[in-house]
Image (spheres, rainbow, N blue to C red):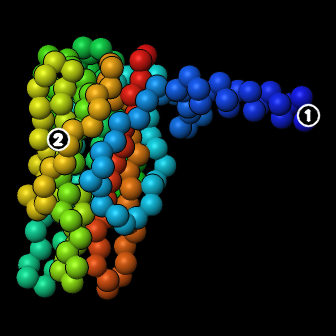
Amino acid sequence: MEPVAGANLLLLLWATCCGYARTDGMRRYTSVIKVTNGGPWGDWAQSEMCPVGFFASGFSLKVEPPQDLFGDNTALNGIRLHCKRGNSKGNTHVVESESGRWGAWSKPLWCPGGGFLVAFSLRVEAPQDLGDDTAANNVRFRCSKGAVLAGRGLAWGDYGAWSNACPKGVCGLQTKIEPPRNILDDTALNDVRFFCCQS
């Protein structure tokens, strides 16, 4: 084994055993929180992280409203994290993994008292066989000071169990998106996972 390759392997093993990984070459995360009821379609997009020292204090959703009888519903299309440093009232940074093309963005919902997002639950409609599939419809978050924020998504499907909680706060996200399928049934956002940071 060449010395450089051996050093890279040791670095990778250290990162794996100690729970550290890099998503974009910049910020480290300590753990990933996820749920088990995400939709089955699509692929994981590139992850996006809050800047170093920033944590998600709020979020907004991209939601397509219900379509008419012959329309194709996609419901939840995207999630944005609104990242802040400490209790700062200004200086926010918005991060977004890939989103579906349909719908409009809601106004952000914020954790009260300067709290951070620490856990989430996803509302997902099960596959509809020959019906109109929508997959993920809404998301709710628990804040570090105990408040629960429910997004302004749609009501199809059910909320699954809560994810594990980040020790300090959410610092990034990665979405699972089904790309547009032309005349076939579209679902857009199917699943999401969030990254936890300590600093």
Please give the label number shown on residue 2.
1
Residue at 83% x, 35% y is 5
Please give the label number shown on residue 140.
2
Could you say where residue 70 lies in the image, as x and y percent from the top left? 13, 85
Callouts 1 and 2 close, C-beta under 8 Å: no
Could you say where residue 182 lies in the image, as x and y percent from the top left? 35, 82
Could you say where residue 133 lies in the image, as x and y percent from the top left? 22, 72
Residue at 10% x, 68% y is 66
Drawn side of residue 180 relative to residue 74, left or right: right
Residue toward you, 188 or 157 = 157
Element assignment for label 1: loop
Mark 1: give few (<14), some (14-19) or many (20+) Cα within 10 Å.
few
Residue at 29% x, 32% y is 164
Report the label total: 2
Could you say where residue 175 lies in the image, as x and y percent from the top left? 38, 51
Residue 183's place in the image compared with 72, above or below, is: below
The amino acid on which the numbered mark 2 sits, given as a three-letter code, is Arg
Drawn side of residue 95 relative to residue 132, left or right: right
